[in-house]
Image (cartoon, helix red, strand yellow):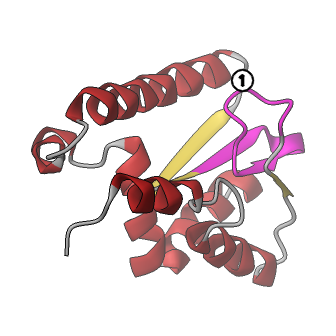
């Protein structure tokens, strides 16, 4: 069933930029391991989803749609309003690169996970974070 522009607009406005399913899954796993973090810190470039301030570790949970997973194939999926969506997502992808590079220059370790990685194997994602934070 084809959606109207109003329905699509409404759906896009409902997308959360914090406390998403993938963020909550990852946070619960980290918390259960005794790892304490700050979430959605606005005074750090890129507003990481999680940070471990003392260890300078920033974690981003990137959804496939907004961050351009498998972009060369996926951008062909856009049938309507391509002139808006393609540049928007490509800019998001470029911003992710810029944020990562700048945080690394500032001494941060930046970890990025795709939403599907978190959903399919949250423990493995948490293992990577735990190793970095604990220096294992």
Q: Which corner quadrant holds the N terminus?
A: bottom left
Residue occupying image coordinates x 73% and y 80%: 28
Front residue (pair 37, 9): 9
Verify whether residue 3 appears in magenta. Answer: no
Q: Is residue 78 above or below residue 124?
A: above
Q: Position of residue 68 (x, y in %)?
A: 32, 43
Judge the density around disc 1: few (<14), some (14-19), many (≥20) Cα neighbours within 10 Å: few
Front residue (pair 132, 47): 47
Residue 42 image-quadrant placement? top right
Residue occupying image coordinates x 70% and y 58%: 18
Q: Which corner quadrant holds the C terminus?
A: bottom right
Q: Is residue 124 left or right of residue 3?
A: right
Residue occupying image coordinates x 60% and y 38%: 110
Q: Position of residue 83 (x, y in %)?
A: 25, 26
How many numbered circles does the render carry? 1
- Where does the magenta region start and end? 42-60
Q: Is residue 30 above or below residue 67?
A: below
Is disc 1 placed on a helix, strand or loop? loop
Q: Is residue 115 above or below residue 52?
A: below
Residue occupying image coordinates x 68% and y 80%: 29
Q: Position of residue 7 (x, y in %)?
A: 42, 62
Q: Is residue 90 left or right of residue 58?
A: left
Residue 114 image-quadrant placement? bottom left
Q: Position of residue 91 (x, y in %)?
A: 41, 24
Residue 58 image-quadrant placement? top right
Front residue (pair 101, 89): 89
Q: Is residue 27 left or right of residue 65?
A: right
In the displayed orientation, state which residue is furthest to the bottom.
32
Q: Is residue 92 left or right of residue 64?
A: right
Question: Label 1: which residue?
Answer: 107
Q: Is residue 49 above or below residue 27?
A: above
């Amino acid at each position: 069933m084809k959606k109207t522009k109003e329905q699509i607009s409404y759906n896009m406005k409902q997308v959360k930029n914090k406390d998403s399913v993938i963020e909550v899954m990852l946070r619960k796993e980290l918390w259960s391991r005794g790892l304490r973090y700050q979430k959605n810190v606005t005074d750090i470039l890129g507003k990481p989803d999680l940070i471990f301030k003392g260890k300078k570790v920033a974690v981003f949970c990137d959804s496939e749609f907004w961050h351009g997973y498998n972009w060369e194939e996926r951008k062909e999926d856009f049938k309507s309003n391509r002139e808006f969506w393609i540049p928007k997502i490509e800019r998001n992808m470029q911003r992710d690169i810029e944020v990562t590079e700048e945080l690394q220059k500032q001494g941060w370790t930046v970890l990025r996970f795709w939403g599907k990685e978190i959903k399919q194997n949250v423990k493995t994602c948490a293992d990577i974070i735990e190793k970095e934070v604990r220096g294992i």
